[in-house]
Amino acid sequence: MKLTYAFVPGFECVMMLNGAFNEKPAPLSYPAASPLYVTLFPLHAIYLPYTVRLLGGKVMSNPELASVHEIGSDRYIVTFAERHNYVYSPQHTVTPPARDLPEKLFRFVKAGDISSARTLMTAELSESVDDDAIIEFFQPFSTITLNPYTDLQATHFLSPAAGGRATGFVIRQTAGKISDMEEV
């Protein structure tokens, strides 16, 4: 049985997959019983390189730096965090800018800034939900990822904090605002 992994680093990097360089790898099919070693080489000097061992859809090394989100019986999204020089630093990690409108909405809601989140919605969508419903909708999720699989209908996947099964959504946009979110 083969598993398909899509890699989503949270920073600019070059990857080595079992020793072969890949700048932006497409989803990769790999035997479930064979370990896959993913080494990330950040393109910013403040981050350190590291390697993650994947086996059977699970992170076997450095689980604090990578998480696997299942989106199907044999498909996974693997997200990677940056590794810093200092474990205990007085400086806070700078969050990279949001890649798209749904990620901005997600960050505003998670930060508790519902009024800013509403500015990203169409008037119709904003009027149809109250603040508690918005918070409750996003509460079980800790990450949002743009769909890396071109053959799947979802535009984004929302994932729980501890990895596990991600939920696909089609997030529609009208005139630069989010007009609908539908679970796939």
Image (cartoon, rainbow, N blue to C red):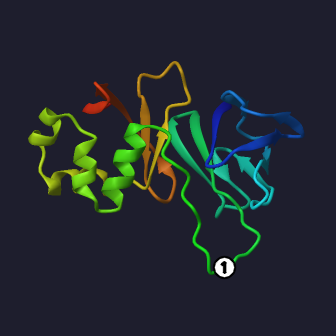
Tell me if residue 140 can be seen. no
The kind of residue on which mark 1 rests is Ser
Local crowd at mark 1 within 10 Å, few (<14), some, or many (≥20)? few
Q: Nearer the viewer, residue 2 or 153?
A: 153
Q: Where, quadrant-wise, is the N terminus in this rendering? A: top right
**Is residue 117 rendered to the left or right of residue 53?**
left
Q: Nearer the viewer, residue 153 or 85?
A: 85
Rendered position, 100 above or below 40: above
- Which of the 4 quarters of the picture holds residue 91? bottom right
Q: Residue, x 53% and y 20% (percent of image)?
A: 150
> Can you name the residue that lies furthest to the right here?
19
**Is residue 66 rendered to the left or right of residue 170?**
right
x and y percentages locating residue 61 in the rendered image: 74, 60
Q: Residue, x 43% and y 35% (percent of image)?
A: 156
x and y percentages locating residue 141 in the rendered image: 38, 53
Q: Residue, x 85% and y 40% (percent of image)?
A: 18
- Which of the 4 quarters of the picture holds residue 176? top left
Q: Residue, x 52% and y 42% (percent of image)?
A: 70
Which residue carries the number 1 mark?
Answer: 89
Q: Secondary structure at mark 1?
A: loop
Q: Nearer the viewer, residue 168 or 108?
A: 108
x and y percentages locating residue 134 in the rendered image: 21, 51
- Number of marks in picture: 1
Tell me if residue 121 can be seen. yes
x and y percentages locating residue 161 in the rendered image: 46, 59
Q: Where, quadrant-wise, is the C terminus in this rendering? A: top left
**Is residue 36 rendered to the left or right of residue 72?**
right
**Is residue 34 rendered to the left or right of residue 106?**
right
